[in-house]
Image: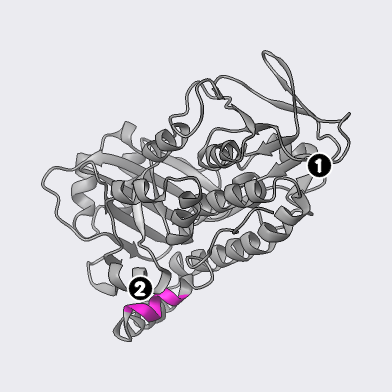
Amino acid sequence: MTDVTRAVVIGGGIGGLTAAAALHRRGAEVTVLERAGSLQPVGAAISLAPNALRALDVIGLGDRIRALSAWQGDGGLRAPGGRWLSRSSAAAAEKRFGGPLVLLHRATLIDHLAGQLPPHAVRTSAAAHLVDPGEPGDPSRPARIKTPEGELTADLVVAADGIHSAVRRTLFPDHPGPVYTGFTTWRIVIPLPGADFASHETWGRGRLWGTHPLEDGRIYAYAAALAPAGERAPDDERAELLRRYGDWHDPIPAVLAAARPEDVLRHDVHHITEPLPAYHRGRVALLGDAAHAMAPTLGQGGNQAIEDAVTLAHHHDDLAAYTAARLPRTMDIARKAARVARLNLMSSRTGVAVRDTALALLSKAGPALFLRGFDGIADWQPPRGRP
């Protein structure tokens, strides 16, 4: 594949904007096509591990994002009654992985990523359809993308169009695509004046809850529970959360009391269990959920999309090398996320008792032992040098 002078990114989420910023820094003319009317994401936060922060260092944003973050990794796992099952330490995480675990609102990250791009690089309300993936090495056959404003051609197309990626279906029509994980999630971002609590995730039987402070004084809360696909509350989702979590430990009741029904977002979780043949075809590369949607139980979905983006920019002229670098790693992490989901959403009373006892014993052995689950994930380093 020849050097990339014009790149089109389909999807203006975290992965797509990171890829656009990384390619722009390498001198490419970049156009981002976002089908929504704005770049503002659904109201939720994102946890960034040291691997993603090091990837953001590549585009000059790592330290700026670290400074904006609120949660620095202190907290741990609790039982619904409030008992601490294990404690995590920011100092131990930073020592082990060379950086903190941090949390910020997705909109904040999106704003900073978009700020790395030249004016008018992002087009909203711009649905895109891949007409031809193109042929690497053949200047007469660039990739072709249909948009409402006409057809675009590109040396490289970055498909960051999410879990239900139309580009993925075009490139690999025989792939089964994402499947339901068996659990649904709720997310809330609200002010909670006077709240004073340690960041925590609480594991019950077949359900979990997490509460974390954000830098601007709001809190981010999320929940997950085993449920049939497509199930919804008969009244509203805040009422559903009250039924499921209203008797759990503080500050969960306070969060639910402060939330309005319209503050609660609910989504079923899907993931890709069968690996794609490749993360590229022709002049097109898939990244993020379009390539390897995973359960959120390791907090690595967005982190892996950021890794994808800087790795793709590094291998912009050799997409086979991009696939080789990313496909085994991301599918290994996706499989691990699925195993963790089975653990933290365990529904057997006996199994939960054994799990909680093991977590407590693990915590007594030291926070570094618990952090071993992120070895090979959070210690990732971006590719170095110019290919």
- Please tell me in which quadrant of the rendered image residue 158 appears: top right
Secondary element type, mark 2: helix
Locate residue 75 relative to residue 287 in the image: left or right: left
Q: Is residue 134 magenta?
A: no
Q: Quadrant of residue 327?
A: bottom right
Q: Nearer the viewer, residue 291 or 61?
A: 61
Q: Determine the residue located farthest toward the top in the rendered image.
A: 149
Which disc is residue 173 wearing? 1
3D distance between C-alphas at marks 1 and 2: 45 Å
Q: Which residue is found at the position 56% from the left and 42% from the top? A: 22
Query: x, y percentage for residue 42?
Result: 43, 35
Quadrant location, the N terminus: top right
Asked if the residues shown at circle 1 and circle 2 are in contact, with their CB atoms under 8 angstroms apart, the answer is no
- Image spot of residue 296 (x, y percent): 49, 55
Identify the secondary structure beneath mark 1.
loop
Residue appearing at x 42%, y 45% in the figure: 61
Q: Residue at x 50, y 63 (%)?
A: 341
**Segment colored magenta:** 367-372
